[in-house]
Image (cartoon, helix red, strand yellow):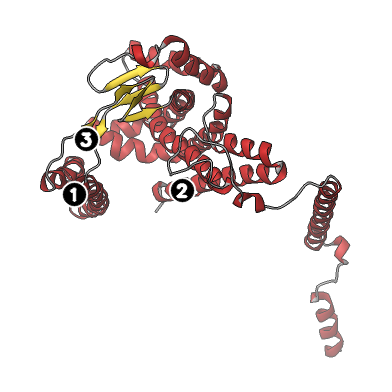
Amino acid sequence: MVADENAIQAHASAPEKVPFWLDPKKRAIVYQIGVLCMFGLLAYYLISNTLNNLEKQAIATGFGFLNKESSFEIGETLIPYSAANTYGRALVVGALNTLKVAFIGIVITLILGAILGVARLSGNWLVSKIAAIYIEVMQDIPVLLQLFFWYAIFYETLPSPRQALNPFYGLFLCNRGIIFAAPESHPAHKFMLLAFILACIGVYFFRRWAKKRQDATGKALPVFRMSISAIIGLPLIAWLVYGAPTTMDVPTLTGFNFKGGITLSPEFIALLLGLVLYTAAFVAEVVRAGIQSVSKGQREAAMSIALRPTQVLNLVILPQALRVIIPPLTSQMLNLTKNSSLAVAIGFPDFVSVANTTINQTGQSIEGVALIMAVYLIFSLSTSAFMNWYNKKVKLVER
């Protein structure tokens, strides 16, 4: 009897075997495998069909064209380039131009957007309304129209180089762009750059140490003033040590254009202005929403312990607002980078423009479009990875 009871209990406690088509977990795995197989078959069909059609039309495939001579010039380059270089180098020039616009545009946009976002919350009625009008107007005008507007400003309103505007010494405004004087090349400049980098590294570690010291002792150091002194002082010392060069490369009118100095083309300025002014309006709203997400009680509590307004902003408001600001801010940074592809509309030689020229000359449209997608994917993923890292770094950790 005891043996029979044990057998009955063991049978009752043993899990009942369920057929896999009735098990939700196993059924989900089967469905996923089926979807992957269907996707693989579809991809195989599309790729094989495309290759067959290209072969029938005697169109070469592959990326061998990257090693052929490009035979076209590019107006603006960050690295040496000529028509005798390869298509690969031309595409690198285009990618660097896109990266230049995106990096400079993001930096200026963050500064302008933060100022506008704070101004939108200003207690001054006039400042708040001006910021609100700017935000509403810039958000409602498509970015492409803004690019055309700024591009037309240079070519329709500014004079030719011979009648260039000269607001002050070394600066000229004309339909060829903005030309301004720059320091002549000197060994001291390399050491100044090295001193600046070392100062930035030193400031980073100093701020970390000062924060730990403040957490441990409650005593705050003048971190901001000391950081600014180091960032300005070290390059200045390097400049003095290596001869304090002051010679400037001043642009001069030679023939029908200026030579010397630094020239910012109308295409670059129009693209930068359009992207910055348009995206800054959205960044301002992100900053405003982030600041308003912090309750008034936090600000009042900080003021009740005699913190100064700058300390309230840096120590109380911003650390809590950043967790709201960073995710949508990342989207705006990605939008600016992707919107830079509109440069083709005003003739700036970004990656899309150079890739289109390459496609027209070689007929490698599939490879060209694939390269465009890959480059913008890399830029976007890199930006997202950095912002995700920064978001994790500044997020509030509950105890």
Towards the viewer: 28 or 274: 274
Disc on res. 218: 1
Q: Which residue is mark 2?
A: 386
Front of the two marks 3 and 2: 2
Q: Quadrant of the C terminus?
A: bottom left
Residue 82, position in %: x, y?
49, 41
Sequence-earlier tag: 1 or 2: 1
Instruction: Please provide percent x and percent y for residue 219.
Output: 16, 48
Q: Amino acid at mark 1?
A: Gly
Q: Residue at x 21, y 36 (%)?
A: 305
**Residue 389, percent from left and from top:** 45, 50
Q: Nearer the viewer, residue 8 or 295?
A: 295
Which kind of residue does numbered mark 3 sit on?
A: Leu
Residue 303 visible in the current orientation: no
Of pointers 3 and 2, the one earlier in the residue sequence: 3
Residue 391 visible in this rendered orientation of the protein: yes
Q: Which residue is mark 3?
A: 307
- 69 left or right of 106? right
Q: Are marks 3 and 1 in contact (CB under 8 Å)?
A: no
Tag 2: Cα neighbours inside 10 Å, few (<14), some, or many (≥20)?
few
- Residue drawn at point x = 49 percent, y = 36 percent: 333
> Does 292 appear above or below 186?
above
* Left or right of 365 in this view: 71: left
The residues tagged by marks 1 and 2 sit, at their Cα atoms, a distance apart of 32 Å
